[in-house]
Image (cartoon, grey):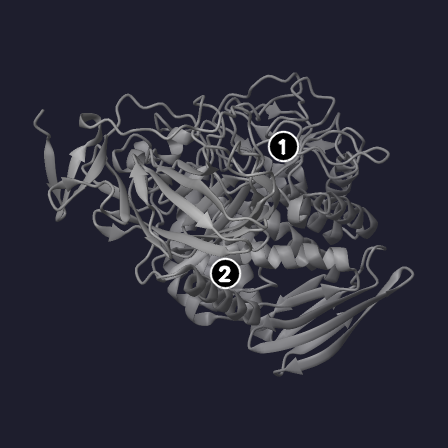
Amino acid sequence: MALDILELDGKTFVRADQLPIPEWPCVLNDEPQPTLTIKDDDMFLVTDTLGNIACNLRDDVNASMGLFCADTRFLSRLELQIEGRAPVLLNSTADKGFMLSVLCTNPKIENRLTPDTLGIRRELLLNGALFSELEITNYSTSPVSFELSISFDADFVDLFEVRGFGREKRGEALRSVLDGKLAQEETLDLTLAYQGLDGSIVESRIHFDHRAPNFFKGYTAIWQLQMEPHETQRLGYRLVMFTNNRPTSRPNIPATLSQAKAAEYMEEQNWAQQITRIRSDRALFNRTIERGEQDVYLLRQSFGKNSTLSAGVPWFSTLFGRDSIIAASQTLMLNPTIARETLNILAEYQGKTDDDWRDEQYGKILHEIRFGEMARCKEVPHTPYYGTVDATPLWLMLYAEYYAWTADLETLDRLWPNALAAMDWIDRNCKETGYLSYASRSQRGLVNQGWKDSGDCIVNRKGQQANGPIALCEVQAYVYAAKVRLSEFARMRKRIDLADRWQDEARELKNRFNRDFWMEDEGFCALAVDGEGKHVDSITSNPGHCLSLGILTPEKAYSVAERLRAPDMFNGWGIRTLSSLSPAYNPMGYHIGSIWPHDNALTAMGLRSLGLVDQALEIFQGLIDMTQHQPYQRPPELFCGYERSGDNTPVRYPVACSPQAWATGSIFQLLQMVTNLVPDAANNCLRIIDPALPESIDSLSLHNLRVGGTLLDLEFDRTENTTSCRVAKKRGNLRVVIEA
């Protein structure tokens, strides 16, 4: 049969369906497996605890495993075997975040190996590419010989496909041809390739080092090893991802794993020197803080010259408007540079036209951007997609918060036109009802467009779904805060007309909100007002976001605060997203009974602002206790809403992202809550108002805290119910005011 040879970007390929590829058998295991996750910039890898990505026996098994970059799976099988058998796991960890380490041994191999003869150390590391090394030691007193194999495959599916979005048609798998011959035993490189429906060619190019495979069988590299007693041998490879013959992640990729590891450690050390170092007198709590610092580092993702925090691994490893903004706000005390670069990136993508397919409007801040084949082929509207109602006022709030910490007038002035465009979008969309609401225009857009954006979460007290347009309570609080804070900047810029107008509009909004959203019979704020102007009257966590922003009158704010701590809402670990008394309640529901750390941290800030310190510290302690039950002391995106009682542990949500940006950020927001720092860098002042450490911590130190141009070391100590603060060191002329 004549092969259909393709010459693409200077390389030669043949369509894979024209040449059957011999398969190396899978290890039969169709049960979902625990996973390890590592990340570097726009790449992430999810494997089982052996470091394997086993070939799927059912389409729904371990679907999230793989090597991903630019929303494409570049590796869907990575399977280490000894004589066709899986190794026996001894230990594994992904503690470093960018690298996973596995220690394993061999099973019994008839006539070849007795159990536990081999010690196998396996490392997998990301740094612009995937690097891997195996170190194999024969611990027997006799020579051994055996066959070791690594099977590779890449389906190059779009991340939306992995998440369950169907496609009517896909591109074509390709197989590389070198020097006019099919790539087989004579080459040390292996290339997996795919041509998308948009014509793009994506490749996974694998180069072997230390020792070449003896031969290939399809996409399986096979080594025939002979080892003397206590001899050690090393194998390795580097996988580089390409799109249209250019590296997908970034250029200048290290050549070896040792070089990549050194580069990662150096970058991490540089990062550690730029952030506030926060430590307590409790070792376990310090591990939680250290994990948070490392995860903020890991979640950074580059977009042009700036970087921001991607929302979470595996499903949301990209730029999100709401998530990236909230995480940047949470980490201002850690490193305000994150906030500046987040503002810059989102300003660059700010809506420039009206486009129903993308739910885009002029001045609107995006929801999410994707770079995979389905986005490129316009099968999904994420190029970017703008279906979020809250990202725009949240951007304005971050704009103000960043200035309070830094007094960075250059950024304030440069982004002022973006702030005006954002406020103009808010005003246009509030014109009809007086409230900022959402209703999707896109055929593939989100039905719900607040932070609770699943399809079943906006329910009334009967558990029925609300009809749009939906005006969420917390979104109105964001608008109120944005107008109050931006009016100050307008006055700075001699725009007295804008300053007065925004102040008047904020005051009117507050009056209307307390009238239209208040449920007198419940003594609580409605989740939302629906398209008919009726209350969406379920008891939810959303009003907790309003507490710190000043939109509620004091008596209403205290009533909300008390209701949130009732047993149907507070389960001992945190506040549920939906009351357990609701007909729609499900402790395993994504937004209808689960608990989200960031949601609780925002509420804790609100309780603190009302002077309800003990109540705020109760949330602090519940979340910290929950986190210390998690792998690596890392807070998950969410967890189930089951009651805390006795010695039970928090129930994990099966597919929660981890690490996840605003869950990680909640650690630092809670620390901000207990220290109660109020920066005013423009007036060269930091106020520390009635700090309050929880009973589980006696002392807390902040080193290299940056406020404006000053670096501070602060030390907090608790004696019984009183927390004192002293300035241990100051490099700059900032005025620090400590108020009891």
Q: Which disc number belongs to residue 338? A: 2
Amino acid carrying mark 2 in the image = Ile
Residues under numbered marks 2 and 1 in contact, where contact means CB atoms less than 8 Å apart: no
Picture quarter with the C terminus: bottom right
Disc 2 crowd rating (10 Å Cα; few below 14, some 14-19, many 20+) is: many
Q: Could you tell me residue 186's position as x and y percent?
A: 22, 46
Q: Spatial distance from mark 2 to mark 1, Cα to Cα?
A: 29 Å
In the image, 156 versus 518, the foreground residue is: 156
Q: Is residue 687 above or below residue 563?
A: below
Residue at (59, 50) in percent of width and height: 141
Q: Is residue 294 left or right of residue 249?
A: right
Picture quarter with the N terminus: top left
Q: Which residue is mark 1?
A: 653
User: SS class of the residue under badge 1?
Assistant: loop
Q: Could you tell me residue 700's position as x and y percent?
A: 76, 65
In the image, 188 versus 463, the foreground residue is: 188
Q: Is residue 146 left or right of residue 167?
A: right
Q: Could you tell me residue 436's position as x and y percent?
A: 49, 38
Of badges 2 and 1, nearer the viewer stands 1
Q: Could you tell me residue 391's position as x and y percent?
A: 47, 45
